[in-house]
Amino acid sequence: MDGWLLDGTAAPMLPISDRGLQYGDGLFETIAVRSGTPRFLDRHIARLEAGLQALGFAAQPGAAPISPSLTETLSQVASEVARVASGRSAGVAKVIVTRGSADRGYRPPRIPQLRRLVGWFPSTPPPRHYYVDGVELRVCSTPASSNPATAGHKTLCRLDQVLACAEWDDPDTAEGLMLDTNGHIVGGTMSNFFCLRNDRLLTPALNTCGIAGIMRAVVLEQAAAAGLATRLVDLTLDELRDDDELFLTNSQFGIWPVRSLAGRGRRVGPRTRDLMSRLAAVGVEECAL
Ligand SMILES: Cc1ncc(COP(=O)(O)O)c(C=O)c1O
């Protein structure tokens, strides 16, 4: 199957009244597929469920239950992801769930009819030197918007990232780092940010903005298993030290060590390499060096 499934049906047309299109009223997931298997599918479904709950996609208090229910929607998403992934060697399964169509106006319908889209995209692996030598990371001037109500969730509202990515098109710069309006590091435009300092692994807390990445969670678990103390912190650029090891994570690529930040060289160190080999051992094989 190529293209998108809309509520399970191929060759779809999305109604213009869809609230995902009109207001960004929805969530998405991008799931890496390797050898026909969606990687960390359960984690993606759990994050989607948490986002749907946080946005109030379940029945409003006192309203009739929605149909399909959240549980039904999530199990349909999981089986449609498996369907688009089947027989594929490598690529991305993208899931979008919106609050469906409604009358004009922001107010959400009391009984939303959730709409789900599941699409397939082939992907080419990132350059090997991103893993071996590390990536160049720039600092974006577009700030990340803060909103504790949506922080951590993968909502469709991604205009901050769109504007940040428009700031550069030098192919040698793999990623851009985004700060909030107080100068705290949030993460890359499409990735989470980590700083390894001595025996501690630091990553932004994401209480007010950013996305709590699937690979971020896997890395935090692997770091704890490796005996590193993990800390969710507020960190500014000035607080980074010269001998910190920096790296980025994303569910598509695993870990990319950072070899330069804002034009200044950084060292790619052994503890990052150790975490990469731990990731490779739990199925993120592109991190094997
Ligand atoms: C803004 C942002 N932060 C973090 C991530 C990493 O999340 P994940 O590890 O789930 O891919 C992404 C992924 O697209 C992202 O867009």
Image (cartoon, rainbow, N blue to C red):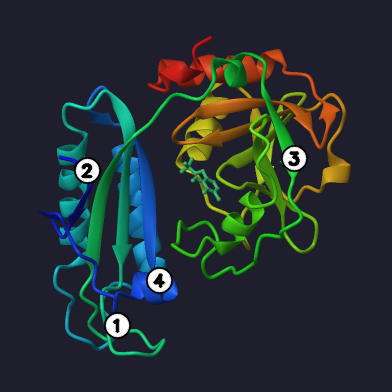
Work out whether mark 1 precedes mark 2 in sequence or the reverse, and give the earlier one: 1
Disc 4 vs disc 1: Cβ atoms closer than 8 Å? no
Amino acid, disc 4 = Leu
Pinpoint residue 197: horizontal percent, then vertical percent.
Answer: 77, 28
Q: Residue at x 61, y 54 (%)?
A: 206
Work out whether mark 4 precedes mark 2 in sequence or the reverse, and give the earlier one: 4
**Measured Cα–Cα span from mark 4 to mark 1:** 11 Å
Answer with left or right where residue 125 lies relative to residue 37. right
Disc 4 under 8 Å from ligand 1? The reply is no
Q: Residue at x 83, y 44 (%)?
A: 237
Answer with left or right where residue 274 lies relative to residue 263. left
Disc number for residue 81? 2
Label 2: which secondary element = helix
Pinpoint residue 183: horizontal percent, then vertical percent.
Answer: 80, 56
Q: Residue at x 20, y 41 (%)?
A: 2
Write down the residue under mark 1: 60
Label 1: which secondary element = loop
Work out whether mark 4 precedes mark 1 in sequence or the reverse, and give the earlier one: 4
Pinpoint residue 159: horizontal percent, then vertical percent.
Answer: 56, 63
Disc number for residue 161? none
Label 3: which secondary element = strand
Give the mark toward the camera: 1 or 2. Answer: 2
Pinpoint residue 184: horizontal percent, then vertical percent.
Answer: 76, 54
Write down the residue under mark 4: 55
Measured along the vertical axis of the image, is residue 23 above or below residue 185?
A: below
Residue 231 visible in rendering = no
Q: Residue at x 19, y 60 (%)?
A: 73
Write down the residue under mark 3: 138
Q: Classify mark 2: residues with Cα within 10 Å, few (<14), some (14-19) or many (20+).
A: many
Amino acid, disc 3 = Arg
Amino acid, disc 1 = Gln
> Can you name the residue that lies furthest to the top here?
289
